[in-house]
Image (cartoon, rainbow, N blue to C red):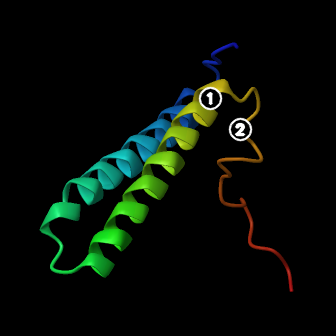
Amino acid sequence: MRIYFNDIGRRSGGALTGLGLCAFGIYSLTMVAEAPDAVLADRAMWLGITMNIAGVISFLLSWLAPDLSGIWCRSPRFPPKK
């Protein structure tokens, strides 16, 4: 496994996105006990699990993928012609 440091801006942005998703997922998991009923508790738990999985994948992908051009895309320089 190799960590890549080229295109540091895009890699840092992807890593921060992953950390944000994990923070949201952890917050959602801590609120499971505060849910007023079992349905909302179940939704909060699965949302937290999903956000944590997405955050970890985003963070790891940002540093371990050799080429980010197809993953974290920039907007096109010129709008497409119709």
Q: What element carries label 2?
A: loop
Answer with the quarter of the image where residue 42 lies: bottom left
Q: Residue furthest bottom?
A: 82
Which badge, 2 or 1, comes first in the chain's sequence?
Answer: 1
The Cα atoms of the two marked residues, 2 and 1, are separated by 8 Å
Residue at point 28% right, 71% down? 41
Q: Which residue lies furthest to the top in this view?
A: 2
Answer with the quarter of the image where residue 24 lies: bottom left
Three-letter code, disc 1 = Asp
Percent position (x, y) of residue 74? 66, 53
Callout 2 touching callout 1 (CB < 8 Å): yes
53 with respect to 71 (left or right): left
Q: Which residue lies furthest to the front in this view?
A: 38
Number of labels in the image equals: 2
Q: In this view, does 23 lie above or below 78?
A: above
Three-letter code, disc 2 = Leu
Percent position (x, y) of residue 47? 41, 64
Residue at point 60% right, 18% down? 5
Indicate which disc residue 45 carries. none
Q: In this view, does 64 lie above or below 46?
A: above
Image quarter in which the N terminus is found:
top right
Indicate which disc residue 68 carries. 2
Percent position (x, y) of residue 7? 62, 29
4 with respect to 53 (left or right): right
Q: Front-most of 28 and 20?
A: 28
34 with respect to 81 (left or right): left
Residue at point 52% right, 36% down? 59
What residue is shown with label 1?
7
Judged by depth in the image, the label closer to the viewer, 2 or 1, is 2
